[in-house]
Amino acid sequence: MTVKIAIAQIHLEQGQKVTLENINWQEFESILEDLGEHRHSLIAYYKGVLEIRMPLPGHERAKVLIGDLLKIILDELGLEWESLGSTTFKSKKMLVGIEPDDCFYIQNYRAMIGKQRLNLDVDPVPDLAIEVDLTSNTQISAYQALAIPEIWRYKNGKLEISLFQDHQYIDSPISKAFPSLPVIEGISLFLEKSKDLPMNALRREFRVWLQTAQKT
């Protein structure tokens, strides 16, 4: 006997994740609608496998800090950008859906100015996505399907950069978006500092560090 339950009956505590298998596209769309837009959970879907995860507070703080430090880099370099945060990027054609912790359009920022609706059949994917403690094969598969050029992943106390090359992600010591900057060193260092510093002080110190790094 098959027992069906409503998605609203699934209750996740902070830090927990649930994986649902054999979910077709129509069911995925229905689940997204049931979950609603005003929620704290994040989803990842790839070819029938759906993950729903509830982040921890530490996860959220790291996500915000990495996004803030990235914005400082963009500001110091005089680059324009757009962010769609944890928008749901989905493609029925590829049977994929992903909600990054944060994402940025840098090369393609003009296409996102004032954007209210997203259609990946015509709109570009983000140039850079941020994920904190990304360990899931489903999420990686979803990113590969969408071919997002660069992922910044924070896990085990340090930043890792993965670049999309030849249909897969390759670990890289440098950022494709900022090849002349020691991004991994700087952001890893200041996330460690964040254990003792409030956010605004951390951002001020990072800006000074970045200005020095640009001169060397």
Image: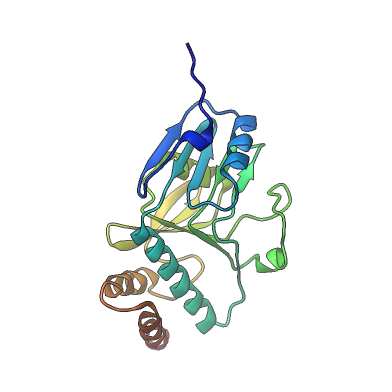
Q: Height in image: 60 above or below 12? A: below
The type of colouring in the image is rainbow
Of residue 209 and residue 98, the one placed in the foreground of this image is: 98
- In the image, residue 215 sits, relative to residue 166, either above or below, namely below
Question: What residue is at 66 percent from the left and 37 percent from the top?
Answer: 92
Residue at the image position 59 percent from the left and 35 percent from the top: 28
- The x and y percentages for residue 203 are 40, 81
Which quadrant would residue 56 be assigned to in this image? bottom left
Q: Quadrant of residue 124?
A: bottom right
Q: Quadrant of the C terminus?
A: bottom left
User: Which residue of the protein is positioned furthest toward the front in this rendering?
Assistant: 9
- Residue 110 in the image, given as x and y percentages of width and height: 70, 68
Taking depth in this image into account, of 9 and 67 the one nearest to the observer is: 9
Q: Nearer the viewer, residue 95 or 199?
A: 199
Task: Point out residue 75 in the picture as x, y percentages from the top left corner.
Answer: 53, 81
**Residue 136 shows in the view:** yes
Total of numbered circles in the picture? 0
Residue 167 is at least partly visible in this image: no
Q: Is residue 61 above or below residue 196?
A: above
Residue at the far top in the pictured view: 1
**In the drawing, does residue 42 fall left or right of residue 146?**
left
Q: Position of residue 69 (x, y in %)?
A: 44, 74
Q: Is residue 47 shown left or right of residue 68?
A: right
Give whichever of 66, 198 is nearer the camera: 198
Q: Residue at x 52, y 37 (%)?
A: 8
